[in-house]
Image: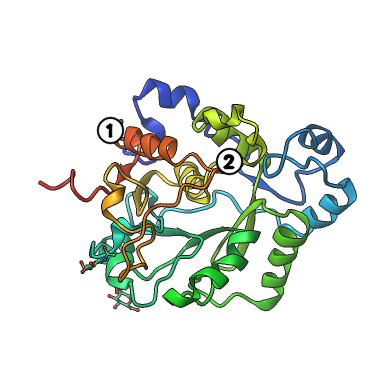
Amino acid sequence: TCPQSLRNSKDEDFQKAFLPNIRVFMHKDNFNIKDWNRLSHFNNPFGFMDMKYDDVLDAVKLIPKPTEPLLLPKPGGDGCVRCAVVGTGGILNGSKMGAEIDAHDYVFRMNAAVIKGFEEDVGNRTSVYVHTAHSITASLAFYQKYGYREAPHDEVLRLKQQQIFLYVSHIILKTHLSFFILTRFYVLHQDFMRYVRNRYLRSNSLNQKYWAIVRPTNGAFALFLALHACDTVKAYGFMTEDHSKYSNYYFQKFEKTHVIFFANHDYIMEKNLWKSFHDRKILKLYQRTETEG
Ligand SMILES: *[C@@H]1O[C@H](CO)[C@@H](O)[C@H](O)[C@H]1NC(C)=O
Ligand SMILES: *[C@@H]1O[C@H](CO)[C@@H](O)[C@H](O)[C@H]1NC(C)=O
């Protein structure tokens, strides 16, 4: 229903890679012994290698079946679902993009999404928050000094749900990616994660000795989730060519830091992919220097 939808992109490479009907979510009704037999061959978070079937089953049973489509067009609009995906990149410091970000139908955030005190630059709405068991607990320890208090949410999460997602994502699924939309809770399917890695972000590091820890960033998964749930996507706070001009994170306002290149992610490959998506009009990438005028 949305003519500008990225699904109608004329880009041949994108059309070849993009699978609009890929399974995005793991939930209680789409996991059985057959799925287990298949998924137990892939390493975490792309499958359940080294885990026990009963443990995984106990956790997956707690994940509600998602209502789909995930995001509906806003009533009275033109049928398009417009999303902003807000990374934590230092490029957002001083950007004054807050109002523009908030004007989207849905706002995605991830990891240590500090909002309080940074509204002018990053906005104040959160529709979808993407995290891992690690990021939801570690963010508090690492980023409290920048004002991070808790995972952002528009509505108050009921404790029971919070306990369930901590249990599911932390105790059993370890670093599997989960996220929540308002008070709903979802877990990304392992098939979706392998799809993102294999079709778009197949890093050369996967051929190195430490291949087993190599995976796309949470930001990359959040962006691909948006590409599958929205018609148009604008990415803010993702890495750009001129990233060395900015701090690692936007909330590092008073100290100039540098991007830390952890060995488990291929930041350069991701940066180049966002730029290429931007140039091919699949999404819009917020780039401070280039887009003026
Ligand atoms: C963040 O932005 C402010 C306002 O533009 C600027 O004064 C400050 O130097 C920036 N901080 C860093 C670390 O770049
Ligand atoms: C944040 O929220 C309030 C309303 O709750 C709004 O008036 C304000 O303009 C919002 N946006 C920004 C960028 O601060």
Q: Residues within 10 Å of mark 2 (few under 14, many from 20)?
A: many
The residue lying toward the viewer, choosing from 226 and 198, is 198
Asked whether mark 1 and ligand 1 are closer than 8 Å, the reply comes as no
Amino acid at the residue labelled 2: Arg
Q: Secondary structure at mark 2?
A: loop
Q: Is residue 202 visible?
A: no
Question: According to the image, label 1 marks what residue?
Answer: 279
Disc 1 to disc 2: CB gap under 8 Å: no
- Local SS, label 1: helix
Find the distance from the CA under tag 1 to the CA under tag 2. 24 Å
**Which picture quadrant has residue 40?**
top right
Identity of the residue furthest to the right in this view: 54
Residue 59: mark: none
Pick the quarter of the image with the N terminus: top left
Query: Sequence order check: which comes first, mark 1 or mark 2?
Result: 2
Q: Is residue 196 above or below residue 142?
A: above
Q: Residue furthest left?
A: 293
Instruction: Give residue 146's position: percent from left, percent from top.
Output: 42, 74
> Type of residue at label 1?
Asp
Closer-to-camera residue (49/35): 49
At a point 77% along the width and 61% down the height, the residue shown is 171
Across and down, in percent, residue 254 comes to 30, 71
Query: Would you say the beta carbon of the disc 2 residue lies within 8 angstroms of ligand 1?
Result: no
Say if residue 13 shows up in the picture. Answer: yes
Which residue lies under the disc numbered 2?
215
Could you classify mark 1 by the number of other residues whose Cα lies within 10 Å: few (under 14), some (14-19), or many (20 or more)? Answer: few
Q: Whereabouts is ligand 2, in terms of quadrant?
A: bottom left
Taking the image as shown, residue 141 lies to the left or right of residue 190, namely left
Q: Residue at 67%, 71% (x, y): give it.
A: 162
Image spot of residue 61 (x, y percent)? 80, 55
Q: Going by the image, does 56 lie left or right of 47?
A: right
Q: Percent from the top left, x then y, of residue 237?
A: 35, 54
